[in-house]
Amino acid sequence: MENKTWVYDEFKQVGKDYSKQYEVAVYDSSHADFRDVTAENNAIIDKLDVKKDQTIIDFGSGTGAFAIQAASHCEKVIAVDVSEAMLDMAKQKAKKAGVSNIEFHHAGYLSYDHKLKPVDAIISSLSFHHLPDFWKGMALQRIHSMLNPAGKFYLYDVIIEYKNAQKNIEAFIESQAKAGGDFLREDAEEHFSEEFSTFDWVIDGLLQRAGFTILEKENNAGVFGSYLCTKNSTNS
Ligand SMILES: C[S@@+](CC[C@H](N)C(=O)[O-])C[C@H]1O[C@@H](n2cnc3c(N)ncnc32)[C@H](O)[C@@H]1O
């Protein structure tokens, strides 16, 4: 895919520019205003039933919070991100935490070249919305091919329920402003005006067409969606 001239340039930042040092520097503290990232990651690790001999890929690994937390539960985490600034921050944090079983890759959903054997689990947290929908479909086919037959995929993102979509988006923007003032208000506004979050029914279809079975689907406030999927329906 990476040799074709018509492929989406996933390294080009759209919306929030995570290649910039100043965005990376404030990422963890600004997200702490509206997320309990440690609790989120523990819940994902539990849902994926991560084992000591397993390998996990984290696409859009950002500042490395999930990778660092998951690393003590498994053999290896492969952290993939298109932002070198994010990868640098994640590497520094991993070093400080004494974590050495994370492999970092400057790549993305469409360009990461998985040369190892298929992995046990793949996660994507708040980064899938950086791809337009056609490319989400292409990315899911690639993710599906990187998993072993019993492999699991966990997706968490801003994913919008059809009913009351506008009302829920506006309520979400207001709740972000309450949590983190103008910074989080503008962050949320930019999310919807420039990035590619989509309806849950689109994500349902894309996952199923790529060959996934959706085991669990949740939505919070009509705007935060999570999916636990298996590669094969025989695993459900
Ligand atoms: C909002 S942050 C999410 C970070 C982390 N996963 C979390 O849950 O906090 C989005 C991350 O996705 C990365 N990203 C954007 N497009 C990507 C792509 N096509 N492939 C991989 N990562 C991408 C950005 O560089 C950024 O680090």
Image (cartoon, helix red, strand yellow):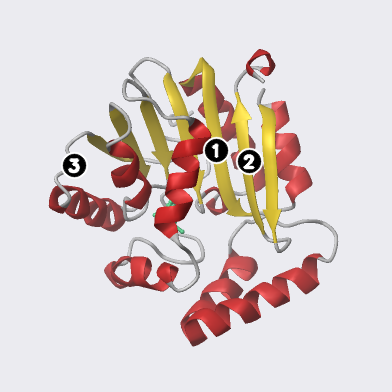
* Residue occupied by mark 1: 154
Q: Secondary structure at mark 1?
A: strand
Distance Cα–Cα, label 2 vs label 1: 6 Å
Q: Residue drawn at (34%, 19%), measured in percent from left and top?
A: 115
61 left or right of 87 in image: right
Residue 215, quarter of the rendered image: top right
Q: Residue drawn at (63%, 16%), measured in percent from left and top?
A: 235
Q: Please rate how many residues cluster around mark 2, counting C-alpha atoms within 10 Å: few if below 14, some from 14 to 19, many from 20.
A: many
In the rendered structure, find residue 99 and report the number of the disc placed on it. Answer: 3
Residue type, numbered disc 1: Tyr
* Residue occupied by mark 2: 227
Q: Residue drawn at (75%, 44%), measured in percent from left and top?
A: 202
Q: Secondary structure at mark 2?
A: strand
| Lower sequence index among marks 2 and 1 | 1
* Mark 1 in CB contact with mark 3 (< 8 angstroms): no
172 left or right of 97 in image: right
Distance Cα–Cα, label 2 vs label 3: 28 Å
From the top left corner, tell me how far across and down residue 103 is, in percent: 25, 35
* Mark 2 in CB contact with mark 1 (< 8 angstroms): yes
Mark 2 C-beta to ligand 1 under 8 Å: no
| Lower sequence index among marks 2 and 3 | 3
Q: Secondary structure at mark 3?
A: loop
Residue type, numbered disc 2: Tyr
Distance Cα–Cα, label 1 vs label 3: 23 Å
From the top left corner, tell me how far across and down residue 40 is, in percent: 48, 52
